[in-house]
Image: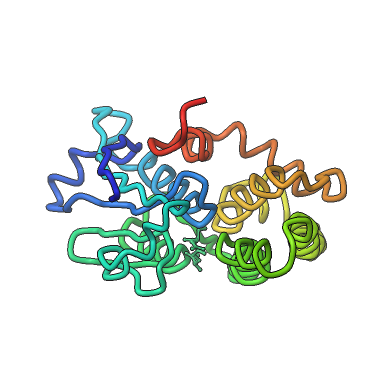
Amino acid sequence: MMEAQEVEVEVEAQAATESGDQQIKLYSYWRSSCSYRVRIALNLKGQNFPLFSKRKKRLKYEYKAVNLLKGEQFSPEFRKLNPVGYVPVLVDGDTLVADSFAILMHLEEKYPQHPLLPPDLQKRAINYQAANIVSSSIQPLQNLAVLKYLEEKVSPDEKIEWVKFHIGKGFSALEELLNNHAGKYATGDEVYMADLFLAPQVYTAIRFQLDMTQFPLLARLHEAYKKIPAFLDAIPEKQPDAPSP
Ligand SMILES: N[C@@H](CCC(=O)N[C@@H](CS)C(=O)NCC(=O)O)C(=O)O
């Protein structure tokens, strides 16, 4: 299971070697929105690594594909990494951390370049709130395990309606919340944590054919993310375990 494939991310290799850092491993599934959040963070933090523009060297992180459709998340080997059996998991030297929010906080504390949280406390709180609307009130309701259960125990037809209802409810709240705070991005003119949760969630909503015209702010942000390389490189289709087109 979990074929290791090295992916070059925009993190500075030379700097990492000099500081004695060990290689980072990310256990991910191409279409997992939770893994997608972490991929964006790794890209952002890599791109601002101090020596990046001078030497153009890159830190490699090992992309460990976990095939959720084949149930690899339930294997004893994987559950040693994350007992709850979900991706993403990050191994960063001696540190093992699972859950995208915990991983982002670890990256934020260890790699302060390109901060994921704004200095202003009100904006910071809004970032936590928006991130948690996605990670507690939307994504768990449309997770693979939940959809499989619905399909088997209720009806396959219910699945899409269920997903649209719960994403829509969360998106309405996010529109209301962020209307007072958004600039070019969710909480101003810089990309912060809220954006890392929104981009993958909007991607998923579009996959389930949610009508995004109901959510003009989120639709606008989605267009803005398409112009940021760190976001573009993290999209599911560009991951090594994505099926070939
Ligand atoms: N709160 C966790 C949720 C993790 C999660 O739900 N991961 C999904 C993919 S996005 C998963 O591994 N699903 C496998 C399953 O449902 O069996 C996080 O943010 O990392």
Residue at figure coordinates x 24%, y 28% from the top left? 55
Residue at 25%, 51% in the rendered image: 24
Determine which quarter of the picture holds residue 179: bottom right
Tell me residue 49's x, y (percent): 32, 42
Q: Residue furthest top?
A: 245
Instruction: Please tell me which residue is depicted at 47% across the width and 46% down the height of the picture.
Output: 40
From this viewpoint, is residue 180 visible? Answer: no
Q: Residue 132's x, y, as percent? A: 61, 69
Q: Is residue 145 depicted above or below 235 in this figure?
A: below
Which scheme is used to colour this image of the protein?
Answer: rainbow
Q: Residue furthest right?
A: 214
**Residue 141 vs residue 107, the one in the foreground:** 141
Mark count: 0
Left or right of 119, for residue 184: right
Q: Is residue 229 left or right of residue 147?
A: left
Give the residue displayed 28% in from the left and 68% down from the top.
76
Q: Position of residue 14 (x, y in %)?
A: 18, 38
Classify 51 as above or below 208.
above
Q: Nearer the viewer, residue 96 or 43?
A: 96
From where the camera sits, is residue 203 visible?
Answer: yes
Quarter of the rendering containing residue 13 = top left
Where residue 243 sits: x, y (%)?
A: 47, 33
